Structure formats: structure tokens, C-alpha cells
Amino acid sequence: MVPVEERKEFEKETSLGKDKENQGDHQEGNPAARCEWDFSLSTVVSSRDNTAVSDTLGVIEFDHSNTILATGGIARKIRIYSFNSLLPQENIQLQGEQSITFLDHVNACNYYICTPAKLSSLRWKPGSGCRLLGSGDYDGVVMEYDLERKLPIFERDEHGGRRVWSVDYSHWDPFVGASGSDDGTMQMWDPRCGEGGGCVAKVQPTVARSSVCCVEFNPFDDALIAAGCADRKAYAYDVRKMVDPVHVFDGHTKTVTYVRFLDTQTMVSAGTDGCLKLWNISDARLIRTYKGHVNSRSFVGLSIWRHGGLLGCGSENNQVFVYDKRWSEPIWVHDFEPMASAGCDHGFVSSVCWRQVHEDQCRLVAGSSNGVLQVLVGRRKS
């Protein structure tokens, strides 16, 4: 557990305004960003041994019931948490005061599964009843794990040993998955097809074989899949004819690290140019650019709360940023580790994930390069 004096210091610095609404400057003629939410820090999960092997949390994923949380990263472990166990007990919170729960990974985690390589991506398999979890790793291998048996049940090594950055599953046929890799390809696969690791389609978005850093099936359109590449562009393909892209999203000045579908009409991309961009899917038109966070070299996460129209991402200055899709500037910024001691490497926020629920309260889980997990809660202002 975190020492009492560190808890007090953490809560003191938080209350002094380390978490803030960031209105920022806005261009003439554009309305200023307006925050309609009261955000606060709810839970901090860390490790007792701060000298342990690097534990960068590269990915956080809620299951489809939004009750189970999986994390993965450098430590070669998939950790599984019951989300309710990370929340503070409502009956012990004092009215008008902020209550922060401090937990240790060992006690907070339901269980973990050791993996053969560092993990870059996790994705729950739709329709599996929270039982099957897919992963992509630094050795270029895609695996599926049966969480009840705590064993891998499917493995494909078709990216030539090059790092797999991203995996996703189709929503119209959950057996079909996709992966993007440093080998410059996006591959679609189906474990029911035995040959070639179950490969059913393969595309190389760029002639130069630029790394494919992210893939995502469109949950609103059975036929569309998007990929973001190191050539500074994102691409959308029709899965029924994986030859040429149907749309090219050109606007970033550096590597596109994430793509996320917001709704039936729009998609969000993130890049190491320090920008998020909102696109119209039908004509690849840029709608809005979001700026404020720092991102020039690392994967810092991107997640969308579709029910509330909020975008969340990390930052290389160790902050969490929340944007409203309507405004280009952040509506809230959270300093991740104000209690870090002098001379300690603050690291950076490396992953984020919204809990997808329909209510006037939202929850964002963020992870850092130092292995710290935080739960942030937002309540709609009255």
C-alpha cells in the first residue's frame, strides 16, 4: 500500500489544482471549449516495488459488459481486474470531500497470465462472454487466450517476426480478426481457415512498406476497416475487396498511431504530431483538429466515449487530456503523478480507455509508463 504521508501529499496536490479545466486560447470566431463535467481522481493502483522491471501499460481494454478490465505492456503479463473492485466504497466517502482509493496491483488484480513477449495490443473477442482475449506482441505474434483456462488457444506468426502494433475483431463475424505490423501489412484472419495462419486478406497500404500502427473495424458498418500508418496517413478499406483503399485520410504530419470510429459518420485519428483529428468518413474530409497534449514519439493512447462525445488521450508530459468532440481545445487536464519524489522519472501516460456506459457519469482508466493505473470519474454538471 502507498504510505500515509504519500497519500496526504497526493490528495493535497490534487486539491491545489493539479487537475484543472483547460480553457486555453481559441481562435477568433470559434467558441471557447466549455467543460460540462466535473472530473476527479477516484483510484490509484501501483506496485509496492518501484524498482521492479519496467511495467509500461501499453494497452487497457474493457470487455463488452464493461465490468472486466484487461491491461498489458512491457512486463509480459495480462492482468485482469474486476472494475467494481477498483472503485471506492460509496458509503465511506464524505460529502464535499474527495476520496481517493489506493491499491496495489497484487491485491487489486483478480489474476494474471504470463505471456511470451511484450504486449502492444489487446482486444476482447465479441460474443465470447468475456472469455476470449486477443493480443499482439513485440515478436510479431497474434494470440488468443482462453481466460477460464488461462491458456492460449490460437496463435499466428504471419508478420515475419515484426512487431504487431494492433489487433481488432470484426463485429459482424467475431471469428474474423485483423492485425497491423511493422512489416507494413494489415492482415485479416480467421482461425477456422487453416492455411497461412488463417489469413483471408492482406494489404500493404504503402509502397515503402511503412509500419501499420493501428487497425480498427467500423462497429457501425460491417464492410469498413481503418488502418493508421507511419507514412502520416490513415486508410479505410472495404473488407469485401481488400485491394485499394476506399478513403485516404491525409492531414497528419507524423506517424498515425491510432484510429477510432466515433459514430456512423466520423472517425478520430491520433498522431505523433501532437494532434487528434476528426474526419468525415464518407469523403475523408477533415472536420476538426484537437491540440494541447504532447506527443512526438510515443504511443500515448486514444479512447472515445461514444455516448458522451468525449475523447481521451495521454501525453508525454505525464498528463491525461480530455477533449469534447465539439471543441479543438481540451476541456480537462489531469496531472498523473504529483506525488512523485524529486529526481524521479515521471514517465508519460501511455494508455487510456473509457468505460462505455449510458449514463450521466463517465469513467476513464489511464495507465502510465511507470505501471501506475488510475481511475478518473466525471459527473455531468447540473
Image: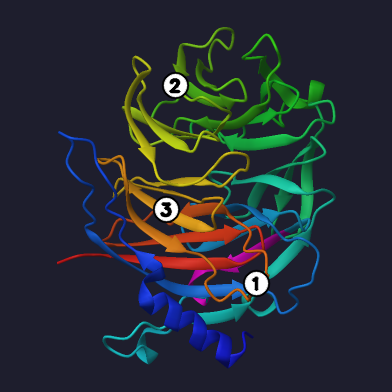
* Location of residue 121 (image quadrant): top right
Q: Is residue 98 above or below residue 276?
A: below
Q: CA distance from mark 3 to mark 2?
A: 21 Å
Q: Which residues are magenta?
A: 78-85
**Residue toward you, 357 or 1:** 1
User: In the image, 224: left or right of 285?
Assistant: right
Q: Amino acid at mark 1?
A: Cys
* The disc label shown at residue 321, or none: 3
Point out the tag, 2 or 1, that comes first from the N-terminus. 1
Q: Tell me, yes or no, whether the highlighted magenta stretch contains residue 79.
A: yes
Chief secondary structure of the magenta span?
Answer: strand
Q: Amino acid at mark 3?
A: Phe
User: In the image, 314: left or right of 98?
Assistant: right
Q: Quadrant of the N terminus?
A: bottom right
Please report the residue visible at 60 percent of the width from the left and 59 percent of the height from the top. Answer: 368
Please report the residue visible at 43 percent of the width from the left and 36 percent of the height from the top. Answer: 276
Point out the tag, 3 or 2, that comes first from the N-terminus. 2
* Location of residue 140 (image quadrant): top right
Q: Is residue 175 above or below residue 345?
A: above
* The disc label shown at residue 195, or none: none
Point out the tag, 3 or 1, that comes first from the N-terminus. 1
Q: Is residue 88 visible?
A: no
The residue furthest front is 343
Q: Amino acid at mark 2?
A: Gly
Judging from the image, the colouring scheme is rainbow
Across and down, in percent, residue 69 comes to 56, 61
Q: Where does label 1 land, which residue?
A: 109
Q: Where does label 2 land, which residue?
A: 251
Q: Quadrant of the C terminus?
A: bottom left
Across and down, in percent, residue 190 comes to 68, 28
Please report the residue visible at 40 percent of the width from the left and 26 percent of the height from the top. Answer: 221
